[in-house]
Structure formats: structure tokens, C-alpha cells
């Protein structure tokens, strides 16, 4: 399915991006080797399950048994930590207590850190508190390649997942496309509302050169998802155009929301509605302009053709 | 003339080793309140850098009362099998004004049988020491034992160079230049020869990474510095 293909294409590079080392800015570091771990019995050395990073630990419908057992074990983390088994003696399928996957643990830590973001911002202090909440040593933060960016990216992926769930469950069929888009963008922006006081910081983290490729990919996925939900049947040029336009509307609304003090962000939704309507009107205008251009071209072409014929025959 | 040469060499080695230790500590990403164990680091290079990093981080971070308490809870244990190295470390600590600071604790011990409790350390580093351990797998198992959940293992070590031209240069340098310098400076060609050979005998980056993974660590990675002359291996415990 189109959506899952896009997801694979985007998730795999973003996951690998996140786990490969940052060796561009130190002149001495020349090469690196990405991880090489005996993660789970069901998965060979490479590549690890890309879904692990992206999905909510509790919503993993399609993941392997190791993930589901580890998400239950991570909720009883102390007992698990004390009784972590030794790995050589595993018989793969029958073993109840599978190894806790580190990606799940990282996701757990990040999720717990989100609770502290409102007070401490998208910083390592929040991540340290989050790690302590989940009874994991804060040293794990050293293993995130881009520290605070990992937290922001986790949040963005989490919001996207929640949006997908909402799309699947809600009935949007009775709205016209422009209203559907408005509603979806509104739903997505509302997820950021609790963190709005610290959202400028998140935006600045996302725009740093190291992080910009991942944040761009995440936004591209988001915009693609929204258009897909609206029932987009576009052809080539339109595909890019539509996503670019929606990306622009989304970013503009996001920034507007930062300075919006109206109750429940009413002004932001009004702003959003106006932008979406403008874009649709512009789209109609452009379509009409295209027809006009075609007609003019055809007319002109006929006269030019006639002229040329007369020149070369006469 | 020799003095100039050797002081240049000394400076160069000093600079390089500073960069290696700096990279190791920045990978570790120390935090206030951390319990860290540095094995075979008697002279205190890694330990001092960790303390400096934590102090500078706390000063720039948001100051609330909790941060200061945490900073006082920071403990860096320096473990070495050689008491002389530990004494050097203690002297250097006093010179830096950390003599009375409870943050650094020097302990004599063997990497294969550590005297620390299970799950008591947030971080474990071993810099240029694991090559000299008789049973590397035992040392790795001990490292795994003392680390907490989420704890990180970091190992800085001289390792294998594989890039074609640089490899030849490095081999030439190792086998011809280093023992010669050893003979000139210390009158001891044999031990420098042994040093170079022991570096070659140590497992390659990939092999060592698989040994670390067998000890139970996850997310085992390595990073080559200077083309592979030095490598930093890291692992996570869960």
C-alpha cells in the first residue's frame, strides 16, 4: 500500500540516520561501523526492526513477540532488571522473558522524558529526569546520537502515529476536502498544545543543520499522511506541489500558534482555515489559468502553424 | 637536535592523547550525580576529565537545588591493579585541588574481579588497559555485572588499521620507528617491540565488538580515530 511503502522508505533512512554516528565534524574520525548487536533471537544481525524506533511501544501491532513481551516487562522494570537472563541459554521460541530491546528502552525513556519537557524544556535535564523515572541510568542519554533532537524526533513520530490512529478511527467522509485538511492539521497541532510554551525551542532544535534532514523527512511524512487521508489522487507535478503547499500552511499555522493567546487557540484555527481556503482557491485559479493557457496556446499554435505553412508553401 | 625532536614527539603524543581522552569522555556524556568506574586508569586521565566536564556542565545548566546535591553525589572510582599508578593519580588529584574532594576515589583492584556491587555504576571506561588484561572476556563480564540498567561501557584502545596506504605507513612506523625510538630513549628495544606486537595481537575492531556483544551488551558500536590506530568501542547494558 502506498502509505506503507512511503513509511518504509522514510523510516528506514531516518532510523539509520539516527543510529549512525555523527562523523562529519571531527577531522580525526574517519570511519565507523554501525551497531552490531545480538539483539533478539528472531532478528539476525542487520537491519533491526525499523518499526521499533517509530512506533509507540504499546501499539506495536505488527512487531515481533520480543517487542510485545518487552513492553510488558518494561512496565515492571525493577523486577526485570534484577532477573535479566543470560543469553546463551535461550531456546528462542519457548522463552517467555525475552531480552529487553534497547530501542524499546530508549523509547520508554524518551516517553517518560516528555512529562518533564513542560518544566525543563527539550533538554538533557528533562531526559535525565525521564531516565530516572523509568529506573534506567541516565547514561543512556550518551547513546543518543543527537541528544535533545532524539527527544523532539520521538515526539514528532509519536504525534504522527497518533494522527494515523485518529485518521483510521474517525469519520471524515462527510467533510469537503478543504475542511478535512483543516481538521487534520488542527488535530495534529493540538497535540503540540501542551508543550506550546517550549515549542519554539523544539523548532530551533529541529532547524539545526545536524537535525534538519530528519525533521524535514518527518514533516514530509506528516504532510503525505494528511493528503493521503484526504483522498489524494494526484499526478506527478501536483503531488509535489500539494505537499509543498500543505507543508507551508502547516508551518505557518505552527508558528502562528506560538504567539496565539486566544482561548483554545481559536485564532490559530481561523488562520488555518483561511490559509487552506486560499490555497484551494488558488488551486482553482491555477487550474483555470492552465486551461486558459492551453486554449490560448492552441489558438496561437493554429495561427502560427497556418503562418508557417503559408511561408513555406507560398 | 634530538631534544627538539623528542619534545616535538612528546607534544604530538600529548596532543593526540588529549584528543582521544576528550573524545572518550564526550561520548560518555557524564552527568552530575553519576557513579563512574574507570578501570586501568591509575594516572587519572579519564577521571579528571570526567570531573571537569561535570563541573562545567553543572555551572551552565539550570541551577536548582537538586543539581547541586547531585553534583556532590558524583563519584568517579579509579581502579588499577598497579598501586604505583594509583599513587601517581592521587598526586595529580592533589595538584589539581581535588585532594579532599570526595568525587574521586582510588581503589586497587583487578579488572577481572572487581570489588564493586552488581548494578552500581552508571558508566564504565577502560582506556588503553584492556590490552593488558589476561582474560578479556572476564573483564567484559565484570563490566557487565557492575553496570546499572542503561549503563554504558566504553573502551579506548589501540586497534587495527585497514585503510590500504595508511596501513603500510603505520606498519612501517610501528615496526621500524617505534622500537628505534625506544632504544634511543630508554635503551629498551625489546619492550617496544613487544608493545607493537601486542597491539597487533589484540582482536580487530569487529572481533572485539562481537566479544562485547557476547558479554551481553547491546548497541555495540565502534568508532575509529586516526584511521583505526585508536578505536572507541561502546555498549549499552539492559
Image (tube, coloured by chain):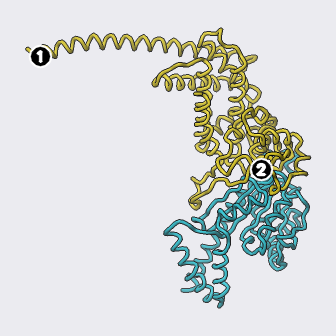
Chain colours: A yellow, B cyan
Residue B237 position by quadrant: bottom right
Q: What residue sits 69% from the left and 24% below the top?
A: A189
**Which subunit holds the residue at mark 1?**
A
| Residue named by callout 2 | A140
At label 2, counting other C-alpha atoms closer than 10 Å, the crowd grade (few under 14, some 14-19, many 20 or more) is many
Same subunit: marks 2 and 1? yes
Disc sitting over residue B31 in the figure = none
In this view, A311 is above or below A70: above
User: Residue A132: x, y in percent?
Assistant: 85, 45
Can residue B30 be seen here?
yes
In this view, B71 is above or below A292: below
Residue A57 position by quadrant: top right
**Furthest residue toward bottom:** B187
User: Residue A86: x, y in percent?
Assistant: 84, 56
Q: What residue sits 64% from the left and 10% below the top?
A: A175
Q: Earlier in the sequence, mark 2 or mark 1?
A: 2
Disc sitting over residue A311 in the figure = 1
**Which subunit holds the residue at mark 2?**
A
Q: Is A8 or B111 nearer to us in this picture?
A: A8
User: Residue A124: x, y in percent?
Assistant: 76, 45
Residue B204 position by quadrant: bottom right
Q: Secondary structure at mark 2?
A: helix
Q: Is residue A245 left or right of residue B137?
A: left
Q: Secondary structure at mark 1?
A: helix
Q: Is A131 or A94 nearer to us in this picture?
A: A94
Q: What residue sits 49% from the left and 24% below the top?
A: A241
Amino acid at each position: 500500500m502506498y502509505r506503507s511503502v512511503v513509511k518504509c522508505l522514510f523510516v528506514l533512512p531516518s532510523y539509520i540516520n539516527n543510529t549512525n554516528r555523527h562523523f562529519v565534524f571531527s577531522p580525526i574520525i574517519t570511519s565507523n561501523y554501525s551497531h552490531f548487536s545480538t539483539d533478539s533471537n528472531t532478528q539476525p544481525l542487520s537491519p533491526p526492526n525499523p518499526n521499533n524506533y517509530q512506533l509507540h511501544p504499546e501499539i506495536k501491532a505488527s512487531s515481533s513477540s520480543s517487542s510485545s513481551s518487552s513492553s510488558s516487562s518494561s512496565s515492571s522494570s525493577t523486577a526485570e532488571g534484577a532477573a535479566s537472563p543470560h543469553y546463551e541459554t535461550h531456546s528462542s521460541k519457548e522463552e517467555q522473558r525475552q531480552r529487553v530491546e534497547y530501542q524499546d528502552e530508549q523509547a520508554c525513556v524518551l516517553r517518560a522524558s516528555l512529562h518533564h519537557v513542560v518544566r525543563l524544556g527539550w533538554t538533557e535535564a528533562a531526559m535525565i529526569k525521564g531516565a530516572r523515572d523509568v529506573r534506567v541510568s541516565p547514561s543512556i542519554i550518551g547513546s543518543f546520537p543527537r541528544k535533545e533532537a532524539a527527544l523532539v524526533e520521538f515526539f514528532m513520530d509519536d504525534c504522527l502515529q497518533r494522527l494515523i490512529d485518529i485518521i483510521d478511527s474517525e469519520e471524515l467522509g462527510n467533510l469537503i476536502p478543504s475542511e478535512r485538511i483543516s481538521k487534520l492539521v488542527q488535530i495534529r497541532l493540538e497535540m503540540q498544545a501542551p508543550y506550546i510554551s517550549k515549542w519554539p525551542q523544539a523548532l530551533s532544535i529541529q532547524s539545526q543543520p545536524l537535525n534538519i534532514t530528519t525533521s524535514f523527512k518527518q514533516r514530509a511524512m506528516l504532510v503525505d499522511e494528511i493528503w493521503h487521508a484526504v483522498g489524494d489522487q494526484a499526478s506527478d507535478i501536483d503531488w509535489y506541489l500539494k505537499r509543498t503547499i500543505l507543508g507551508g500552511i502547516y508551518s505557518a499555522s505552527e508558528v502562528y500558534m506560538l504567539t496565539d493567546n486566544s482561548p483554545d487557540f481559536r485564532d490559530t484555527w481561523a488562520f488555518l482555515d483561511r490559509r487552506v481556503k486560499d490555497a484551494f482557491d488558488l488551486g482553482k485559479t491555477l487550474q483555470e489559468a492552465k486551461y486558459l493557457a492551453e486554449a490560448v496556446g492552441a489558438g496561437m499554435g493554429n495561427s502560427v502553424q497556418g503562418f508557417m505553412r503559408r511561408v513555406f508553401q507560398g | 637536535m634530538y631534544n627538539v625532536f623528542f619534545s616535538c614527539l612528546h607534544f604530538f603524543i600529548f596532543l593526540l592523547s588529549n584528543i582521544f581522552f576528550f573524545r572518550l569522555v564526550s561520548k560518555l556524556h557524564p552527568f552530575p550525580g553519576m557513579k563512574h568506574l574507570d578501570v586501568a586508569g591509575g594516572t587519572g586521565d579519564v577521571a579528571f576529565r570526567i570531573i571537569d566536564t561535570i563541573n562545567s556542565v553543572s555551572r551552565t545548566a539550570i541551577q536548582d537545588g537538586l543539581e547541586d546535591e547531585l553534583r556532590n553525589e558524583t563519584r568517579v572510582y579509579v581502579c588499577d591493579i598497579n598501586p604505583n599508578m594509583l599513587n601517581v593519580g592521587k598526586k595529580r588529584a592533589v595538584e589539581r585541588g581535588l585532594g579532599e574532594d570526595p568525587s574521586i576515589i582510588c581503589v586497587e583492584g583487578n579488572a577481572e574481579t572487581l570489588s564493586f556491587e552488581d548494578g552500581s555504576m552508571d558508566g564504565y571506561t577502560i582506556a588503553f588497559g584492556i590490552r593488558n588484561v589476561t582474560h578479556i572476556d572476564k573483564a567484559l563480564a565484570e563490566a557487565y555485572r557492575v553496570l546499572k540498567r542503561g549503563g554504558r561501557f566504553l573502551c579506548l584502545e589501540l586497534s587495527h588499521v585497514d585503510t590500504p596506504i595508511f596501513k603500510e605507513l603505520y606498519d612501517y612506523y610501528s615496526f621500524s620507528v617505534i622500537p628505534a625510538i625506544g632504544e634511543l630513549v630508554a635503551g629498551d628495544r625489546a619492550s617496544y617491540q613487544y608493545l607493537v606486537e601486542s597491539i597487533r595481537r589484540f582482536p580487530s575492531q569487529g572481533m572485539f565488538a562481537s566479544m562485547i556483544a557476547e558479554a551481553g551488551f547491546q548497541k555495540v558500536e565502534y568508532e575509529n580515530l586516526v584511521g583505526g590506530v585508536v578505536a572507541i568501542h561502546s555498549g549499552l547494558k539492559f
